[in-house]
Image (cartoon, rainbow, N blue to C red):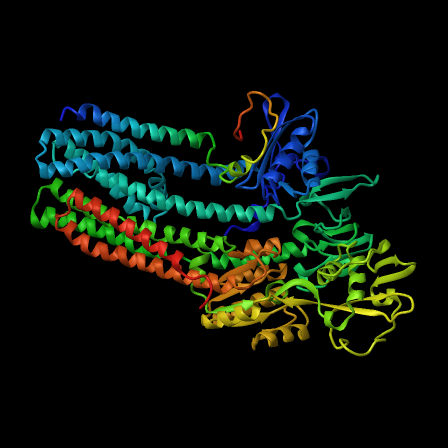
Amino acid sequence: MGALIFLIPAALFLGLLGLAAFVWALKKGQFEDLDGAAMRILLDDPKRDPGEDETDP
Amino acid sequence: MTAPDDLVPAAPAIDTPPDQEPYPVPFVIELPGGLRRLHLMVENIHCAACIRRIETALLAMSGVTHARVNMSTRRLVCEWRDTETSASAIIERVEALGFPAAPFDSGRTEQTGAGEERRLLMALAVAGFAAGNVMLLSVSVWAGHAGGMGDATRTLFHWISALIALPAVAYAGQPFFRSAASALRSGALNMDVPISLAVLLAAAMSLYQTIEGGEHAYFDASVTLLFFLLVGRYLDHRARAKARSAAEQLLGLAAVTAQVIDADGRQRPVAVSTLRPGMIVAVAAGERIPVDGDVIEGISDVDTSLVTGESLPCPVTAGTKVFAGTLNLSQPVQVSVRAAGEGTLLAEIVRLMEAAEQGRARYVRIADRIARLYAPTVHILAASTFLGWWLVVGAAWDQSLMAAVAVLIITCPCAIGLAVPVVQVVASGRLMQHGVLLKSPDGLERLAQVDTVVLDKTGTLTTGRLSLVNENHMDSGDLALAAAIATRSTHPVSKALVEAAGGLALPSPESVSEVPGQGLCAVLNGEDIRLGRRQWCGVADRPESGSGTELTGTEIWMTRPGRPARRFVFADTLRPDALAAIEDLRGLGLRPILLSGDRADVVADVARQLGISDFQAEVLPDEKVARLQALADEGRRVLMVGDGLNDAPALATGFASMSPAAAADVSKTAADMIFQGQNLAPVPASIRTARFADRLVRQNFAMAFLYNSIAVPLAVAGLATPLIAAVAMSSSSLIVTLNALRLRLLAWKAG
């Protein structure tokens, strides 16, 4: 039973990690253009201003 | 369906006189630091190269700081410094690359579609996380129940579950709570009322049990319930959003800009909505005419098929009346505006269509019809369980309430919430694979019930394009020569000629020039050759007799010195599989009817070829609507298949409707489904898919009811435990999903 003391928090922590990763991806707009990424991999990197955000604002 | 007017990018809302408000300005968003942003819908984006061409071209413009194409939505966001460039320069640049672009109001789209989808995804993520973790703890409790877990450990587990489940329910349940609250406020019951009640009561009762140290905690049931229902809700929302964006795309790209010629002869782009009678508009070759008006300068051919259903282009010169929505084919013309916006024939047709759509909006989806019966039944059942246990059996109030909550959880329409969306997603995915775009969310349900199919001729049964019909009667050298001259022209007849000469080696004539509205002249080996209208080529009436003269259709002539004139006859041919598709439709028990705006002899000929006995020619748009209504009054459920602008009101009137992808924008908006390609086979195949999907939905509901009829008596009797509830709910959801996947096994074509 002593194992529960760290196993339950560990399980919750991993779950929260997954949730946080998903929320981050959603907020960064990763799900907004699902087809574009597959196409863009074929392109050379265009010249960009340094520090420009990757996502649509 | 939404009325098309709502979908046109917001009309300039700013209250300034039209001539001071250059077109794209109302859509431009002002950012701090002198930056401006514009969202554009862009057509024809297919591949990586398209993205690259647009983005690099824009970023190369001075002042443009950001340009990014969204491939999924076919949209472009562009930002620039106000001092260095302008919105119209950016639109012109994109259009010059060959990508028609239309600005749209990004605020509206985000408020309605994207924001809601994001909220649902967040709720889904939270519910998924909570369901996974609470289930983990619950499984331990159930295992511990057999393995002798102590009461203290169980209560600890319940407390941890409560800590996860309660915030999750409060957050992820909001879509249902909101919908239930608004239904109750308007005095109605929907499916979300029992869902909200079950989730909230289950959470509250479980908390009470946990505080008391009891064993009946339903945290797992309430969060998994939310999770499954959110999956269904999300799928449903995606289907709707897809339909809406398809419609927006179609209408956004209709003529919304026009080139006005000012008194000083300068051209500037303005919004069509700001045009007034008397203004002069320039229409380039290949553009749609934005207004009703009279041609005042230029000679060209206009494709009027959208308005009249006629497949041949009409020649226009100064003085000819033209209509909004028709396509200017060969040469630029100037048009004096007679009516714009609401006054056009196009707007009249749209009004007819909207009136028809209001009738269709009365259709109630299967799921909603079931909800109307289901929700009150569940509430009465739960209430009587509570009263039965409390008053009749004489149990304690909390035990009675527990039994009532168990009834609510068990009956909660988890499988029912999934029954329709899952089938819908599988079916629309399958249709999409075969080039059929499902536009209205309930279109599939309606399509499954049709028993009559009304078809338009031009562009629907036929390809809508001309092809050479007297090829067998002529010398291939003549054909090659004519085709060689025709390659220099974009007229549909020229294109058909080039296509007909497909494999032939073409000579290379010199100095080909086009005489607008008449034909082409060229020089080959010192001989003057003319290819064009009969009178212009100097050919007398019917000079040639012999093979092929009995053929009718559009004709052009070719004359060379010292040789007999050659006649080329073109006609709009049937789609390659039209006959097979009509047979297939008959096999499905549908009665085909042909209604066309074209001439009687042409329509009769097509009807005879396809064996359709019920046909009508020279039908006007409102007559089509009247005929459809008459059929509906006879109790028939009519599928309307058509493509022209003249079909749009009929498409909206039909019980269900389909359009080919080459159809007019308005027609595509009115139709429930759009099919791509040269074949008519998608029509019967979609009906087959819809019928199978309908059967699956009914099976799914039947299974959900069967499961209820077993589980509910247990719950009423107070025998349902949290374990039974969780198992029953998950398994019924799985069965419903697996059943929907059977749709993938159905053969697409007949036989």
User: At 76% across and 47% down in the image, what residue appears?
Assistant: B281
Q: Quadrant of residue B746?
A: bottom left
Say if B267 sits above or below B525 in the image: above
Residue B349: x and y in percent read 62, 58
User: At 46% across and 33% down in the image, what residue appears?
Assistant: A30
User: At 25% across and 40% down in the image, what residue appears?
Assistant: B222
The answer, for residue B724, to whether it is visible in the render is yes
* Residue lying furthest front: B505
Say if B350 sits above or below A48 in the image: below
Between B172 and B723, the one lying in front of the other is B723
Residue B272: x and y in percent read 68, 45
Count of all numbered marks drawn on residues in the image:
0
Say if B387 sits above or below B683 in the image: above
Q: Quadrant of residue B59?
A: top right
The answer, for residue B215, to whether it is visible in the render is no
B674 lies left or right of B294: left
B441 lies left or right of B214: right
Q: Quadrant of residue B129?
A: top left
Report the quarter where the C terminus of chain B lies: bottom left
Residue B423: x and y in percent read 38, 54
User: At 30% across and 41% down in the image, what residue appears?
Assistant: B226
B46 lies left or right of B370: right
Between B404 and B421, the one lying in front of the other is B421
Between B255 and B232, the one lying in front of the other is B232
Residue B672: x and y in percent read 51, 56
